[in-house]
Every structure is written in structure tokens, then in C-alpha cells.
Amino acid sequence: MEPRLLPDEFVFCSVAHEQEEAVADLPVLATFREEEGLSLVLERSLAESHGFRYGPVMRCISLTVHSALDSVGLTAAITDCLARQGISANVVAAYFHDHVFVPAARAEEALMALRELQNRRK
């Protein structure tokens, strides 16, 4: 596992299902259709330029390890490592990699903690 901190700030927001077509062409990082609306993960600057309300500002740490979608324990190890440091984490498992969204103000600290975890697991 090689954690890599992406340079941009990201936010999570939601739009009503009736507005999905209006955001279909936006370069969002990820979407998830929920009962309450379409959740978007996008760069903070994009959210601000479109007037979206959003939650905490996050940074993304991508884990450059090919983990199977049905692997056991990786997400638990990551979240436990960060929880011990008092850092919240929102983990998104994509097809090739896992991506950990952490509060922007603590991103460097989270990156160091994940690197220490990586070194312990070698």
C-alpha cells in the first residue's frame, strides 16, 4: 500500500434527483445515488462555482494497491489507524484502488499515519 495525497480539496454534496440531468456533465470525482438524492464528490472550487452547499472540506489519499473488492480487513486497518489519531475518514472503494477522504486540515497527519501503517505491515 502506497498512500498518495491528491493536491485538490474535495467536498461532498447532494442534489435532488430532479436536478441530476443539470449536473450530468460536471467533472465530478464520484457519484452515488441515494434515496434522498444524488451524492457528489467534487473539487471544492467546482462546488463553489456552482453554488452547491457542502459539508467539511476534505483531501483525498489514494491507496495505490490493487485490492479486491471482496478483500477482508483493509478498510478496517485504515480506519482504525486514523481513528487512533482522532482523524475521521470516509473510504471510497473504487474498482482499482481505495480512496480515503480526510479533513483537509489533518491531511498531512493522516498521510503520515498511513505511511507508518504501511511500514508496519511490510
Image (spheres, rainbow, N blue to C red):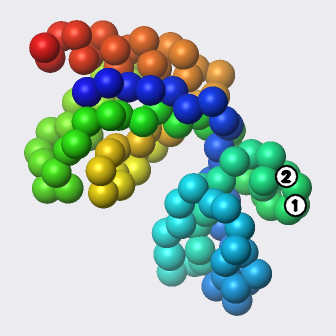
In percent of the image, x 74 and y 45: which residue is there? 44
Q: Is residue 92 left or right of residue 117?
A: right
Q: Is residue 30 above or below residue 64?
A: below
Q: Is residue 19 left or right of residue 122?
A: right
Q: Is residue 76 visible?
A: no
> Which amino acid type corresponds to the residue marked 2 in the rendered image?
Glu
Dot 1 crowding, Cα within 10 Å, few <14, some 14–19, many 20+:
few
Q: Which mark is residue 88?
A: none
Q: Is residue 59 above or below residue 32?
A: above
Dot 2 crowding, Cα within 10 Å, few <14, some 14–19, many 20+:
few
Q: Quadrant of residue 85?
A: top left
Q: Which residue is label 2 attached to? A: 48
Q: Is residue 63 left or right of residue 58?
A: left
Q: Is residue 113 visible?
A: yes
Q: Residue furthest bottom?
A: 18
Q: Locate the C terminus and report the quarter of the image it occupies.
A: top left
Q: Which residue is label 1 attached to? A: 51
**Can you give x and y, in whole percent of width and height, for residue 4 in the image?**
44, 26
Q: Quadrant of residue 36?
A: bottom right
Mark 1 to mark 2: distance in Å? 5 Å
Which secondary structure, mark 1? loop
In percent of the image, x 65 and y 22: which residue is there? 105
> Which amino acid type corresponds to the residue marked 1 in the rendered image?
Gly
Which secondary structure, mark 2? helix
Q: Locate the N terminus and report the quarter of the image it occupies.
A: top left
Residues marked 1 and 2 touching at CB (< 8 Å) = yes
Nearer-the-camera pick, 52 or 86:
52
